[in-house]
Amino acid sequence: MAIKRRTFLKLLGIGSISTVSVAGLGNLLSQAEVKAVEHKAPEGALKAQRWGMVIDVKKCIEAGSDCMNNCPAIQACHSTHNVPNIPDKKKEIKWIWSDSFEHAFPELRDERVMEHLSKFPFLLLCNHCDNPPCVRVCPTKATFKRSDGIIMMDFHRCIGCRFCMAGCPYGSRSFNWIDPRPYISKVNPEFPTRTPGVVEKCLFCYQRLDEGKLPACVEACTAKALLFGDLNDPNSEVRQILKERFAIRRKVELGTNPSVYYVI
Amino acid sequence: MLEYALKGTKKYWLWVFFLAILILIGFSFYYQQLEVGLGITGMSRDVSWAFYIANFTFLVGIAASAVTIVLPYYWHNHKVYGKMTLVGEFLAVAAITMCLLFVVIDMGQPMRVFNVIRYPTPNSILFYDVIVLNGYLILNLICAWTVLHSYYKGVAYPSWLKPVIFLAIMWAPLIHIVTAFIYQGLPGRHYWLTAIMAPKFLASAFCSGPALLVILASLLKKVANFDIGDKAFETLGKTVTYFYLVFIGFYLFEVFTVFYSNIPGHKAPFQYLFIGFEGHAEWVPFMWTAVVLALIALILLINPATRKKETTLVLACLAVFFSAYIEKGIGLITGGFTPNAFETVTPYRPTFPEAMITLGVWATGFLVLTILYKLVLEVERRKNLAVKLQKN
Amino acid sequence: MYNTNKVIIGIIVFIIFFAMPFWLNFGKVEALPKPELPKEEKKCIEDTDYMKAYHMKFLDEWRKTKVREGKVNYINNEGKIYKMSLQRTCMKCHDNKEKFCDRCHKNLVVQPDCWKCHLAPEEVKKWQ
């Protein structure tokens, strides 16, 4: 025998330990920063360095309760992406939805402040964080950050471990507990549905951006309360409104650096 | 050696048959879960991990606790644990088997499990968990099997095993630390975001694991005439006592920090678990049961007279085991997800299929344990027989 | 050999069990599957032979480059540009999954999981 069992086992031990420690060291050095996947926008697509959204809650109020109760933005998003309408709240799937101030900003809850703010509806969606915890924890890179700031989902690769749902501090992610198809009232033949056992969320309409179109919710909003653009471009529409108005983001203290702003 | 598992008394086969039935029932419900999806469980958009992952976490602790036997025996040459080491190591093997089953069962797309290896992602803690758990399973199997085989052959175990045993000893705390890191590194989950999570995990593991060993050893003494010796019981009792005290201490430190700092988000999970939050109090009776069990255990363990008596020690260990199971198994996960990101409560209760699948996994673990213990007992019995024959 | 009889019986049972599909389908030879090709289009994105042999790898490549690399267009060996999309490109010509995909797949007992998410044209009709 050319190699003794003892030597072999030693080598095996040294090999596995060094593999683990190199991986661990690499992780430590990268400080759990998530690297973005290089994205080059195809021809004819809308381009940005960092996509972001500004939601003007005042415009929602001005549009009236009818608009708020049947928000066209929510409907457009959910019908474009074949998001099912599951009545059981526990199994519900939502990409964009409306909630109250005290739920959207629980740490800012204050009775006196709420006298004014609780009448506003807050549209909640994936924040497409600059430092996304969901991407950091995903064990298969099924969810990843693109260099244009979009947090993508690869439904083909998702193993359904739901680590990302535990990691997301905004409750933006939904899991397909059951087959969603029976709960889709009208299907969009251009977009797939999902299979049971994968996680889904808002994708900033990457497929519409590729075609040079704005996200479905932005386009559908009749009150023009949703603005979409490049947060890194000082001349963009989103930056213009942020220069003039008071804006807040959800749970900034967690260091996730969300790309969705609410102007009040 | 494995053929020893195929020859047994009627009682042995009845027990194996009983476990097999539980496994089959669990499997039939799991088949339903594969068809329908995880929707047959009580989990929801807000409580997206629950009973399966809770059991997984608890069992990682049980597996890691083998080190409390193996370390004194191999490192400090603590001969009292001579008969106990194999029992401890094989318990680790069974516990890790259950852990791996629970992880796969909790996945939405179990067919894609190898994506974790196909696309290794070092920034995910789960990646390391896969490495340490599988590594620990292999290390324990190698150690226990080789030692048992050498004993069976009547020779000393080979010298190459020593470094492997030491590696297994150092590996054991790692599995629980990495598992704690899964939880404690998440922003926005107040109940988990605490540096004491990993030490708390280890402390609760090192008391609940030896407690289970005491229970198992006392059972083996009754049904299989396999006595680990009074000294071993006594030492195990001490291990359970000290680590239980450390664990209770850690938990109370946490309670102090949360309530004295008075930060609402950090208080909320504790309130939900112990007194109820916004009208929801689903787990309050369970958490107080754990508290009562903890008090009983403390009284029985701290008092030397009751700790040294086997019956009261077993009672104390049962109390330790179940209080730890409630705290880590149920409180930890639901507490982490409740209240949710919007500070509201979505109650979680396991469903019947979920409970049956869980039971099926436990039965699988006990079947693995039974077979491995059968080998140990049979080898031991034959040794004793040979010794007797020689004497005559 | 020990237990010769038992071993031989074991081997026989093993062979019978593993050859099960063969026994079950014995004498039931079906005609080779004939997938229905689109009537208007004469040529697929690449050569028919290539598509026949490699369509699965081809689609796998598409889904990788589309979702993960963000690319949209596929250029075939004649320089023609196609949008990479199963629903919006492939199934526009092959407008019946059952008559095209399933005929071969069923025969070969392969079950691609594309259609658990992606919508086949006939599936879409169910909603209308």
Image (cartoon, rainbow, N blue to C red):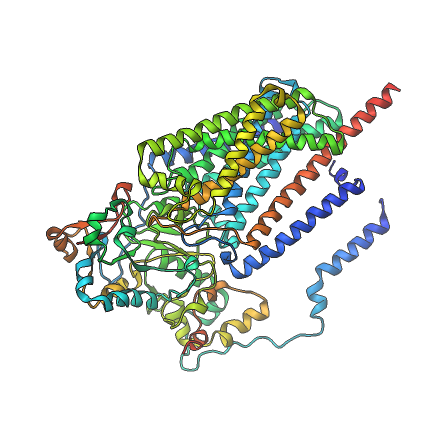
Residue B315 at what x, y percent from top left?
Answer: 62, 31
Q: Nearer the viewer, residue B162 or A64?
A: A64
Query: Is residue A209 shown above or below B384?
Result: below
Q: Residue furthest bottom?
A: C39
Query: Is residue A192 shown above or below B165?
Result: below
Residue A258 in sight in this render: yes
Query: Is residue B391 shown above or below B111?
Result: above
Residue B14 at what x, y percent from top left?
Answer: 76, 45
Q: Is residue C15 left or right of residue C77?
A: right
Residue at 67% x, 25% y is B310
Residue B351 at what x, y percent from top left?
Answer: 53, 54
Q: How many marks?
A: 0
Position of the N terminus of chain B, as image quadrant, is top right
Q: Is residue B132 left or right of residue A130?
A: right
Residue A128 in sight in this render: no
Query: Is residue A214 shown above or below B236?
Result: below
Q: Residue furthest left?
A: A244
Residue B375 quadrant: top right
Residue at 32% x, 58% y is A203
Q: Is residue A232 left or right of residue A207?
A: left
Q: Nearer the viewer, residue C41 or B209?
A: B209
Residue at 54% x, 27% y is B298
